[in-house]
Image: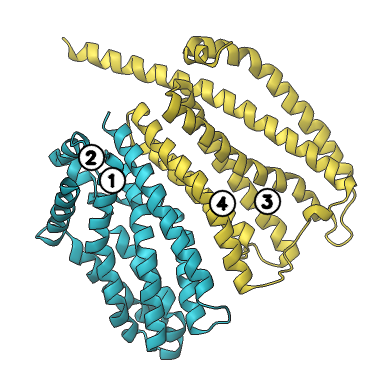
Amino acid sequence: MTALIALLVRDMRLAIRVGGGAPIGVLFFLIVVTLTPFAIGPDLALLARIGPAILWLGALLASLLALDRLVAADLEDGSLDLILTAGVPLELAVAVKAVAHWLTTGLPLVVAAPLLGLLLNLDPAATGAVALTLLAGTPALTFIGLIGAAVTVTLRRGGLLLAILVLPLTIPVLIFGVAAANAAIVGPMPFATPFTILCGIALLSIVAGTFAAAAALRHAME
Amino acid sequence: MPLIDLANPTRFRTLADRILPWLGAATILAFALGLQQAYFAPNDYQQGATVKIMFLHVPSAWLSTMAWGVMSVAALGTLVWRHPLADVAAKSAAPLGAAFTLLCLITGSLWGRPMWGTYWVWDARLTSELVLFLMYLGVIALWHTIDDPGRAARAVAVLTLVGALDLPIIKFSVDWWNTLHQPASVFRVGGSTIDRSMLIPLLIMAIAFTLLFFTLHLAAMRNEIMRRRVRTLLMLRADAAGGH
């Protein structure tokens, strides 16, 4: 247990400190949202209508940014070998790594979403709905991304390929995330229906992502 | 013969060489019969002759998912039993699956133009087929970026199994997403209400396509084994040249 907590603290420290790249994700999120009105025009009514979709797309793309370093950095400096020989189940270790990654890159996106919602003319209820769906959805994105990171771990420049592999798998998360946010804003269906499915997908992704990533890492390290 | 014997490449090649002509002949026969049946099948009272596209479109769609199934079984073979032939089977099935998916998308869009007045709609079925195509391309890309074949096989195997888990979820989500936008859509061609006079040619064509898949798959596996042999020989030669 102490080993896992040490791993969590270490990963979070590495992500926050210089060269870690955790703040880049939020910055990227902000820039994507800022760019959208330039592409579609400053019509506030239109922005309010497609605001949840823009926020979700921005968060989805931003969550991809730091993924290629998630396990590759550990492979390069040898700490992955230490983790493998530490006596802790690899599944738990990668899950802890993913949690640390989510706390430093996913959670800031959730926190930033209400602020960006202001820029997109979302009313408070809509902003709350988007933030809530992101809170449930970003862990799914992180754990699906973990699979991609583990599968491409031995590649020197796996970042682009990782995005290609991971993005199709995130389609259900995107669909139900945006659907739940829109349900809260315009209806007609209740917010709970798509939201509970989104939570279900998130839980499934956490389980599947952990085991798949651990299997991929084990095979890659042989 | 036990499956493990096929791990010997020479033995597999002998077997493949023996089976391939028969499989090829069966494919040609099935296609001859299927195309003849499809040609003489009645036109649809609404769609006219364009309904014939169905005889290519539906079997391609069926094979586009079956190829992922073949890849998933091969992935299990790679991860669980470490069968060397499973790597080869998975690698050879991916381009075939992508090709049949593309064929399904192209025939579907050619069919959609006269029927729906557009080449593409974001209909649930079309969308999930497109996503499937993207996933095939991702798998092929992964095969081509990891240079060690064994390591590539294991990485792809994990991705394939994750895909097999996620594909039904994607299908379900896309269905849900689309019915949200356009309920009671008019895009419900065929279905189980299809008439016997069209169903029989369709089934024969489905068998012909499946035979075609297995013929091409076996041939591709044989080629892949030879490609690996060439690779090994080239590396041995490079080693020998470097040793001087």
Q: Secondary structure at mark 3?
A: helix
Front: mark 3 or 4: 4
Q: Is residue B184 above or below residue A186?
A: above
Front position in the image: B90 or A215: A215
Letter of the cyan chain: A
Dot 3: few (<14), some (14–19), or many (≥20) neighbours within 10 Å?
many
**Amino acid type at mark 3:** Thr
What element does badge 4 sit on?
Answer: helix
Are labels 4 and 1 assigned to the same chain?
no
Same chain letter for marks 1 and 2: yes
User: Label 2 vs label 3: CA separation?
Assistant: 52 Å
Quarter of the image with the C terminus of chain A in it: top left
Residue placed under numbered mark 1 in the picture: A92
Rounded to the nearest angstrom, the CA distance separating label 4 from label 2 is: 33 Å
Mark 1 closeness class: few <14, some 14–19, many ≥20 residues within 10 Å: some
Q: Does the CB distance between marks 1 and 2 fall below 8 Å?
A: yes
Question: How was the colour assigned to the protein in this rendering?
Answer: by chain
Residue B99 in percent (x, y) is at 57, 41
Q: Chain of mark 3?
A: B
